Image (spheres, grey):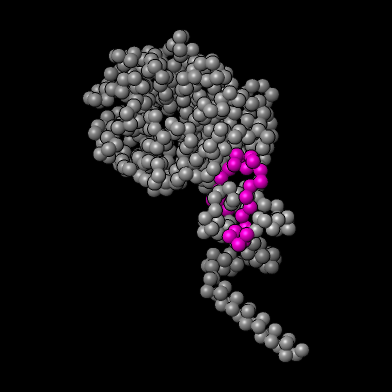
Amino acid sequence: MAEIEAGTGDSTRQTSRSDGEEEKNGADPELFSCLLQPLSADGDPNYAGVRRLLLHRKALSGCLRRRDWRCNGKGYVAYRNYIRRPRNWENLQTPSLSTPGNSGRWVSSLNPLSLVYEGESWSSSRDLRSGNLASSHRTSFSSSMSDSDRPRRQGAEPAYSFVGMHCIFDQSRASVTILKFGHASSNLLAYGAADGTLTVCTVSEPPSVIKQLAGHSKEVTDFDFSSNNQYIASSSIDKTVRVWEISKGICIRVIYGVSSQLCIQFHPVNNNFLSVGNANKEITVFNFSTGRIISKTAFDSEVTSMDHDHTGQLIFCGDAQGSVYSVSMNSHTGALSRSHRDRTSSKRRSPVTTVQYRSFSLLARGPVLLTCTQDGSLSFYSVALEIQGYLTLRCSLKLSPRVHTVRVSFCPLLSLEKGEFIVAGSEDSNVYFYDLTRPRHTCVNKLQGHRFPVVSVAWNHGENLLASSDLYGTVIVWKRAKTS
């Protein structure tokens, strides 16, 4: 018996010695820096040491989980189910779910609505299982909510379910402020960054960068594809407008201004017209071929966002005071004339970050306009084309105020018979889907994957891919689930 105990003691000492050697070889300097920090005179050393150790291990556990997930080749759904598992998950697990291939680590989703919810999160400090419901909701058609409102399972829309990430572009060294897909294109994607670069890439298999366009010395505020996707016109804080030939990757024209150029659009019918909004409180129409000014019109404040209607006879724009304008445009001469203005009712006026036109909506039974301001106010207008673009507010949504310029977008027409859906970035690093027709529980879905505020979103023409960008320079292309 003594020999057995001695043998056990020797094996225990050998095991502890080997564990100590492993720990010594894999010593983490961050852990020691946490443990060796000086304590205050009245502090409890045991409590402080244990607390630092737990905090360090908490951050490390998330990294190990994601590394394990990638090494096993599992998808984001499996990872999400794993981090959401109940505390007694091992006891509840059935033998059929534990196989030598997955060692019981990944559980397939048993809920048909599982694909509706978010993808993986790279932020280990965020608890994906936590979510605060809206503290207050209006009972009228206009609603108010917080970006952190978690979508209810009963209200999730299968049309906006996602199977995961299609691809990721992380070549940019600065924040990606704007991104767009090409006209009538499902694969051509471009994005502009705060360092003045434009990147053109394809999301078809295999995803790759086509051209890197460098020329602006400051942030790219906006850009637009020509109708044939052969050219890109970009505006910048450096007071210039540049026209790029994508196939050659060169700048073929530079138009110099007297103030920051904030938004830009090609004419949808006559691509020889290029409309630019600037910080000099005006919209200027340039000749694309010569770069000469055709016409201009003045406004009350900086023109921060704009969009054309499908006929090319109207321009809708927003300014730095939160007002939205309808401007008539002659498709032959390029002459501009202001038609209508919708002023914000808020006392605190905020710049308009998004103006997006759509030719038809089942809710409005006609053309509609979506606007968003930096203080989080979303507005949905019906457009009367026969009255020179007169705007009628149909519904609105109040989100939490933003510090950065965050853009929103209409969702595809697939499920409009059930509501009016939009997708928006958020400063809590998530992508949210909202139904503007709901007086309560407006958020219907959420995507997680960014680590920094999401500032721009865009759909492709095929409506099966959604691109989002953040302040860290990461662009994620999400793949939507196929629906019947």
* Residue furthest top in the image: 387
Quadrant of image for the N terminus = bottom right
**Measuring 60% from the left and 62% from the top, which residue is drawn there?**
100
Q: Is residue 193 visible?
A: no
Would you say 50 lies left or right of 346 here? Answer: right
Q: Is residue 175 above or below residue 368?
A: below
> In terms of depth relative to the viewer, which is nearer, 239 or 437?
437
> In terms of depth relative to the viewer, which is nearer, 247 or 243?
247
Quadrant of image for the C terminus = top right
> In terms of depth relative to the viewer, which is nearer, 54 or 418?
418
**Measuring 22% from the left and 25% from the top, which residue is drawn there?**
290
Q: Is residue 7 above or below residue 484?
A: below
Would you say 217 lies left or right of 344 here? Answer: left
- Quadrant of residue 270 in the image? top left
**Measuring 36% from the left and 27% from the top, which residue is drawn there?**
264
Give the mark count.
0
* Residue furthest right in the image: 1
> In terms of depth relative to the viewer, which is nearer, 209 or 393?
209
Q: Position of residue 67 (x, y in %)?
A: 53, 58
Q: Verify whether residue 119 appears in magenta.
A: yes
Q: Position of residue 47 (x, y in %)?
A: 69, 64
* Residue furthest bottom in the image: 3
Q: Main secondary structure of the magenta part?
A: loop
Q: Position of residue 206 (x, y in %)?
A: 39, 46
Would you say 145 lies left or right of 340 here? Answer: right
* Residue range highlighted in magenta: 99-124
**Measuring 60% from the left and 80% from the top, which residue is drawn there?**
17
Q: Position of residue 366 (x, y in %)?
A: 51, 16
Q: Verify whether residue 327 appears in magenta.
A: no
